[in-house]
Structure formats: structure tokens, C-alpha cells
Image (cartoon, rainbow, N blue to C red):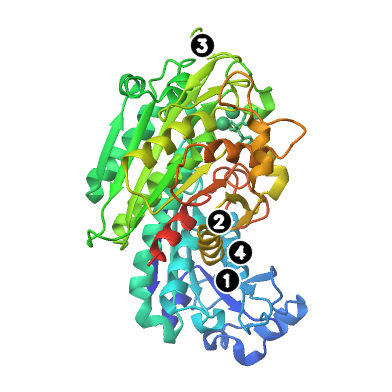
Amino acid sequence: MQIAVSMLKKREQASKAPAVVYFLPESFSAKDLDPSLADCGLDIAAFLKDRAFVGAKGSSAHVVVSLVPKKFTLLIFVGMGKRNEQKHFSMETMRRGVGSAIKCVQAKKISEVAMLLPESSLFGISGHDFIKDMYAIASMAAYKFDAFITKKDAKKTMDIALCAAPGDQKASKDGAQAGAIIAQAVNRARYLNDMPPSQMTPTDLAHEAKTLAKEHGLECTIFDGKKIKELGMLGLHGVALGSDQDPRFVILHYRAKKANAPTLGFVGKGITFDSGGLSIKPANSMETMKDDMAGASAVIQAVAALAQLQADVHVIGFAPISENLLGGSAQKPGDIVTFYNGKTAEVRNTDAEGRLILADALAYATKNFKLDCIVDVATLTGACIYAVGPFYSALVSDNQPLADRIKEAGNRSGDCVWQLPFGDDFKAAIASDIADIQNVGDPRIAAGTITAACFLREFSGDVPWAHLDIASSSFNVPNISYVGKGATGSSVRLLIDLAMHWR
Ligand code: BES
Ligand code: ZN
Ligand code: ZN
């Protein structure tokens, strides 16, 4: 899907589009209706009353009228809901409203839409941030993974014109520019994850990082399988043993203008396909495992976006990338691996491979770079889906100030996180009789997402660390109108926001 989002200077221009979207607060009155609707040939207030549309959260109504002589226009009215305790409307309601309007337009096979946006002040945020968010959401909502659909009549373009309220016009150019960068990062991450796994191998994903580095002036270092083995990153090496595809370790480095700025480290799990290895997954659990690289693609795209946004912190993305298959040389349950930092782990289950590759990445990152924090992002555990459900990513950290920053970034960006408990009691779950630790948790301690995080914590040293399990939120999230089926780009917006607000 080719998506073009643009900004309209004048609200009157919107009437020319074949579909126009209006946002209305709950219990709106006739004066809230756009003046352009006055002579469309239909008493809009009466129509909306007839449809029992009062502007409630999650509601919408649509009708076709003639806004311009001899032309038919689809009008979509979207509810903004009520104000909250701070007297602001909800950004998430607004995002979902934008999403449902775009889905409505797409369902009617219309490929052009104009949206008359409300004032940013109603949401308690700046015009820049509001336009940025709306631009990114419109683009996310229009995304469809249709690269392999050959049907000729399939609509492959979507033109969205956003019209900022008069008070937001000044901020709209810069806001749109930032929104475009974020949208590109999110949708590109989704595209990489949605690609068939045989066409998005470790080499392909590393190539993406290299291309972005060239495009945006980033430093990019890529280790191949031989180098990974030489360096003693045997967790990553071990996981790759079952596959014919050579693994990769990607380091993507963005340097801010100020040399003494803080440095953030982002680490993303890049399993381009997870069969489970010899501890093979049942067929239905394997079906979505092309998405097991969502952490890596999020990190790579976020770093590229931060370079374009000229963030004032240094950011280094680390991505260990491999397939997890079960070829003749595959690692076996019972094997013991030694990681980059010298620690050993008993591999009791080859399907708990994410922590094995992340362990080396965390150890490498914290040993070779001076980092002010390290945040890893991974589709790490099935347990996460049951712990927090699809609308949140799970956050685990023993550094509360960092966890709080991540929560704030999550709330601002709409990429929500829910913090799980963490502490020494959980550590016992990964104790092994024959190695330093084991890669599965003691079933009596049950909390699989937390015990997986305990494993990772062994490798982050003294650097403030936080872990995001996005197994819940990265694929097939239901009921959120601006992310359809398939990959969601979970945590791309959060990582960008975190770095942009670090200060
Ligand atoms: N990639 C999976 C986790 C996953 C499951 C992501 C479902 C998205 C949806 C991970 O590698 C895995 O298989 N983890 C195991 C760990 C277990 C063997 C300790 C799991 O969660 O079952
Ligand atoms: Zn697995
Ligand atoms: Zn996995």
C-alpha cells in the first residue's frame, strides 16, 4: 500500500476530497458542525440525531451527500468522547477514531480522504505533538501488507489530507515532518515482520540496517557467523547452529551533535523464524513465528528515525539475528553454552532461544560501550500474552527511574506498557545444577515473562536496564482500528519517544 499523507492549509479545501472526516465531542451542538456542511442538501444535525450519534467514544456515522456540485462525498463523523478529569479529550480515543475512519474509507474502496482535525489544546498537548501523532496514526491505519496480492482491482494507494485547526497551522509543518519519520519507521518495521520468513532472513534484516545507515549517515557494524563465534558469542552461535542461514549481529550507531550527550542502548531480538528448534513448537504456535524478529526491526527502525529527528542523545541499536531451526547440527536440550561475558547456561529447551541471543547482545553492548541505559525489546515469552493481554507490552526492570521514563514514553506515544513485579525471589527459577543458569524457569515460580527477564538481567551488568516483552502486542492485536491484522510495529513509537524526551 502506497500511503501519502499531506497537510491542507485551508479547511475549505477538504470539501474537494471524495471522503471527509469530522470529529465531534460527546454532546456536541449544531454550532460544532463545520460551516461547509450548511449547504450540502442534508440537515446534518437531524441526520446525526436520527442515527443516535452523540459523539460518544468509539462511535461514528456516515452518509453520502453532495458537498460540491455533481460530486458525491462520503461524510464520516467520529465521536471524540468526553473530557477526562483534567478536562482533556483522550488521545487514544482520537487515534482510534482516525483509524476507524480510514478503515471505513478503505472498505468503501475510496483512496482519498480529508480529515478536519480538532484543536490540539483540547487534548492538553502542543500543536506539534498533536499533528505528529495524527500524521503517524493516519499512516499506520492505512498500512496494509499487500505486497503479494496480485488481484488487479486491489487498491494500492491511499491519499490522506490532514487539515489542522487554525490554532495548529503554525506547528503543522514541523509536526507533520516528525510524524512522517515516525510513520515510516513504524510501517517499515511492520513490513519487515510481515514479510514471509524465507524472504526476510538474518542477512536480509542486517542488510536493511546497512541500507538505513547509508541513507541517514549512521555507523553500522555487522558481525557474521564466523566473527560471532570468534568473539565467543556462543549463545547466538548456538541458536544459529540448526539453520543453513548465517546469523548476524548488527550494531547501528547514531551520534548526536553534542559529543558529551547521554548514550542510550537499545537491544532487539531478531529471530527471523522460530520453529522452537528441537523442542519444536506445535504447528499452530509456529504459524506467526515470522514475527519473532519484531524487537530487532523495532530497534533498527527507531534508531534510523532518531537520526532523522536529530535526537539530542546518542543511540546505539544492537540486534542479534538468527533463525531457530532444527537442522542436523542444531543445539540440543542438555547442551551448555558459554556467553560473551563468560557465564554459562544449560539449554533445557531450545524454544527459549530469545534469551540466549539477547544475553550475548546485552553482554557485548554493556562491555564495549559506555551506556546510560539499556532497553531490550523482544517477543520473548508466550506467558506475556496471558500476563498483560494484547493492548500492553510487559515491562520488567529493577531500575524504577528508568521504568518510569518508559511508562511515560508509553503513555505519551500510545505504545502502552504494564510493569510486572521483579525481585530476587524470582531468581531461584533459573538456577541450574550443572551450569550458572538454565534457560527455562522453575514451573513452581510460574511467571514465565519475569523469569525470562531474570535470565537477561544476568547480562546487563551495572547499566540501568529495562526489558520489554512485546510477544503480546506485536502481532494480530484485535480491536485497535489503527493496527489491522499482522505486525503492529509495537514499541517503535515508544523507543523514539523515550529518546526524544530523555533530556
Ligand atoms: N518466540 C517465542 C515467544 C512467543 C510466543 C512470541 C508466542 C510470540 C507469541 C519464544 O521464543 C518462546 O518460544 N518462548 C517459550 C519459552 C519457554 C520454552 C520457556 C515460551 O514462551 O513458551
Ligand atoms: Zn522460541
Ligand atoms: Zn522466539
Tell which residue pokes out farthest to the bottom in this image: 31
Question: In front of the other: label 3 or label 2?
Answer: 3
Spatial CA distance of label 1 from label 4 is: 9 Å
Residue 153 on image: x %, y %: 50, 44
Which residue is painted at 57% across and 76% down in the image? 22
Q: Residues within 10 Å of mark 4 (few under 14, many from 20)?
A: many
**Would you name the residue on which mark 3 appears?**
327
Nearer to us: label 4 or label 3: 3
| Mark in front: 4 vs 2 | 4
Name which residue type carries label 3.
Gly
**Distance of mark 4 from mark 3, alpha carbons?**
44 Å
Residue at mark 3 to residue at mark 1: CA–CA distance? 48 Å
Ligand 1 within 8 angstroms of badge 2 C-beta: no
List the residue tagged with mark 4.
Answer: 96
Say if 422 sits above or below 430 in the image.
below
In the shown orientation, is residue 325 left or right of residue 229? Answer: right
Q: Amino acid at mark 1?
A: Met
Nearer to us: label 2 or label 1: 1
